[in-house]
Amino acid sequence: MITLQNVRKDYLVEKKSITALKKIDLTIERGEVFGIIGHSGAGKSTLIRCINLLEKPTMGSIIVDGQDLTRLSPSQLQTARREIGMIFQHFNLLSSATIYENIAFPLRLSKRSKSEIDKKVRDLLELVGLADHAKKYPAQLSGGQKQRVGIARALANDPKVLLCDEATSALDPMTTQSILKLLSDINKKLGLTIVLITHEMHVIREICDRVGVIDGGEIVELGPVAEVFLNPKQSITQEFVEQVSDFDFPEELLEQYKKMPAPERACHQVVQVSFLGDTTFQPVLFQVLQSLPVQFNILHGTINRIKDTPFGRLVLEITGEPDDARDAVKHLQERGLRVEVLL
Ligand SMILES: Nc1ncnc2c1ncn2[C@@H]1O[C@H](COP(=O)(O)OP(=O)(O)OP(=O)(O)O)[C@@H](O)[C@H]1O
């Protein structure tokens, strides 16, 4: 749906060039929710604003639904932009216009008839749960309600892509949840491709299918959210994953194993097992216990969710002869679990 090829963006500030994006190559599939996470100054806003050419890349192509936006004339670009809606951290609503008029605004720009506009605005108000607020002004709404208006306005021209620029950063946690749920529902209902930027990993975990980590104007890690969560490769990704980790394994537990005499230690192995998707609920441990003369002792564990995928992590003590313990680890791995030997 969206392809960025060799995209570079330099800003000229007081005759000095600042490189915000170095060389971005990225493909975002139709219908997916794609998240870009990075620290302040990493280049997130520049990247998302390049997708609809609010920022013109210094180099490279931006292809949206088969069209290279960098090659269009101003009027062609204006038409192409109707396919790309956008919402913002501070909502950017017209304060002197009612909610109805805010949503009607892009429809008036695209010269729709009065009755068409009326039907569309009412449908959108319904979709975002604001049917009773049509006559109010933005100042009379809460932050979450204002963002709902932003979403309705962005959807007015039936775009294929929705860009979300830190859309929940100004909202409290509960409101954030409700906006993310609305975005997720819209993605499923309308098959809309959503690209969002954020500095918060919980936003990524909540609704994204894939994530790209941006650092110093480059995508340094990319993959399905569950994989990146379970196996972050770069240290910056590990930091982001830590933000939302509720897996606080008490390391001192390992100390007592380290103190054991060597022959006894050899019969106790400590492993961390990660479960993803269906395996989370399968009796995998029981199956291994039935087939080998080993015992499992659960030392620590959590079960959580990444978007719609359940995942769990356990720290297990495996007691048994060293060969049997090794086989138990092998069996767990063969059943699709990620096993890391801690001791
Ligand atoms: N209009 C501009 N003019 C000059 N430099 C800019 C402009 N916009 C961004 N930059 C610079 O480009 C780099 C990337 O900025 P960008 O806003 O894209 O990062 P970001 O990850 O979105 O940060 P934040 O989360 O703080 O918004 C920074 O060094 C920034 O100072």
Image: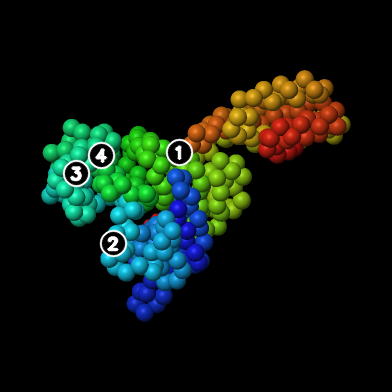
- Residue denoted by label 3: 116
Against 15, residue 108 (above or below) is: above
Left or right of residue 122, residue 303 in this image: right
Identified by mark 1, the residue type is Glu
User: In the rendered structure, are the residues bearing label 4 and label 2 in contact, judged by CB atoms less than 8 Å apart?
Assistant: no
Mark carried by residue 78: 2
Distance from disc 2 to disc 3, alpha carbons, whole Å, reads 21 Å
For image coordinates 76% across by 28% down, the residue present is 318
Element carrying mark 1: helix
The quarter in which the C terminus is drawn is top right
- Residue denoted by label 4: 124
Q: Earlier in the sequence, mark 1 or mark 2?
A: 2
Mark carried by residue 85: none
Q: Residues within 10 Å of mark 4 (few under 14, many from 20)?
A: many
Q: Position of residue 129 (x, y in %)?
A: 26, 33
Foreground label between 1 and 2: 2
Foreground label between 3 and 4: 3
Distance from disc 3 to disc 4, alpha carbons, whole Å, reads 12 Å
Q: Earlier in the sequence, mark 1 or mark 4?
A: 4
Q: Earlier in the sequence, mark 1 or mark 3?
A: 3
Identified by mark 2, the residue type is Gln
Against 172, residue 166 (above or below) is: below
For image coordinates 42% across by 64% down, the residue present is 68
Ligand 1, image quadrant it occupies: bottom left
Q: Earlier in the sequence, mark 2 or mark 3?
A: 2
User: In the rendered structure, are the residues bearing label 1 and label 3 in contact, judged by CB atoms less than 8 Å apart?
Assistant: no
Identified by mark 4, the residue type is Leu
- Residue denoted by label 1: 206
